[in-house]
Amino acid sequence: MTFRKYLVLAGVTVFAAAGDSMLSHGMKQAGNVSLHHLQNLFLAVTNPWVAFGILLLLAFFASYMNALSWADLTYVLPATSLGYVLLALVAKFALHEQVSPLRWLGIALISGGVSFVAGGPALTSHHQEPAKNILADSPRPSAASANTAHAVSIGVKR
Amino acid sequence: MRHVYTWGGILIVVIFSVIGDILMARAMKQVGDVHEWFRRSGLWTVVGRTLSNPNFFLGVSAMAVAFFSLLFSLSWGDVSLVAPAAASLTFIGNAFAAKIFLHEKVDRRRWIAAILVAGGVALLAG
């Protein structure tokens, strides 16, 4: 894991939390959407909160795909869930909302779950990828072949 | 009747979220480490490789369906039920699906994480 990769995971978390909260704020202003009033759905997009929320969710999407290119789905998803913790902390300390004991328990559970995953490897599945720079994260085939390649190149030099 | 709508909506959201996540994860594994591609051949190679992957488009479509069914469900049911139920069931569903379809090694550590996170999300979003 490089610093840049941690930055990508942070982006996934922050953009998801910010985008979701803006979208939910905007949709509350836009009102109900039903099958009989489908046009309301498209009107909702013209709400600035909804529009900016969608923009942030696009940023989330880009970082999410970036993360999925070098880490397992079951590694990236818990990282995303830290966004919920972030939202609760923002609600408590920035918006001065009441955070109930049950929600603090929720924060503790998510944080515990994330720390469980963070201790393990980021990548366990292996696909036909250009195994060049994933040596640091995947222990087996790529590292072994890279070592062999290194040894061969040394051998050739001598 | 309202409950049927609400839980039906939640189920549709969960199914399409899981399908979308799995397809997207598969697409990006086929694309390969984007940091590596970016360093070697620049941004447009990354964008081109991603956009030319069929799984990417299938995944985006599934996610779009999930997104709009979430909007519908939110207008039918209470946010305090729909949001946490959909989010936490998606976590569990993804852990199963990643093991089956992506051959990820979902070991005990990751199962515990998935269950803790699903429980935490249910409490937090509720």
Image: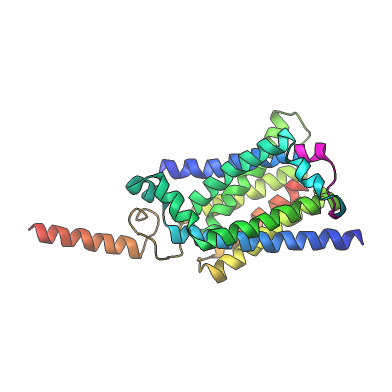
Q: Can residue B77 be seen in the rendering of this structure?
A: no
Counting from the top left corner in percent of width and height, residue B85 is at 76, 56
Q: Quadrant of residue A28?
A: top right
Q: Residue B21: which quarter of the image?
A: bottom right
Q: Residue furthest left?
A: A158
Say whether residue B35 is left or right of residue A111: left
Work out whether residue B8 or residue A136 is closer to the camera in this orientation and state it: B8
Residue B118: image location, x then y, percent: 68, 56
Apparent side of residue A152 relative to residue A8 in the rendered image (left or right): left
Q: Give the residue at x 64% y 62%.
A: B18
Residue at 52% over, 67% down: B102
Is residue A36 visible in the rendered image? The answer is: yes
B3 and A121: which one is in front? B3
* Residue sitting at the far front: A39
Q: Position of residue A35 (x, y in %)?
A: 84, 55
As drawn, is B106 to the left or to the right of A20?
left
Dominant SS type (magenta): helix
In reply to whether residue A28 is colored magenta, the answer given is yes
Q: Which residues are magenta?
A: A25-35
Residue occupying the point 77% across, 41% down: A44
- So how many labels did they put on this image? 0
Screen quadrant of the N terminus of chain B: bottom right
**Is A156 contained in the magenta span?**
no
Q: As displayed, is residue B103 above or below residue A101? A: below
Q: Position of residue A93 (x, y in %)?
A: 69, 29
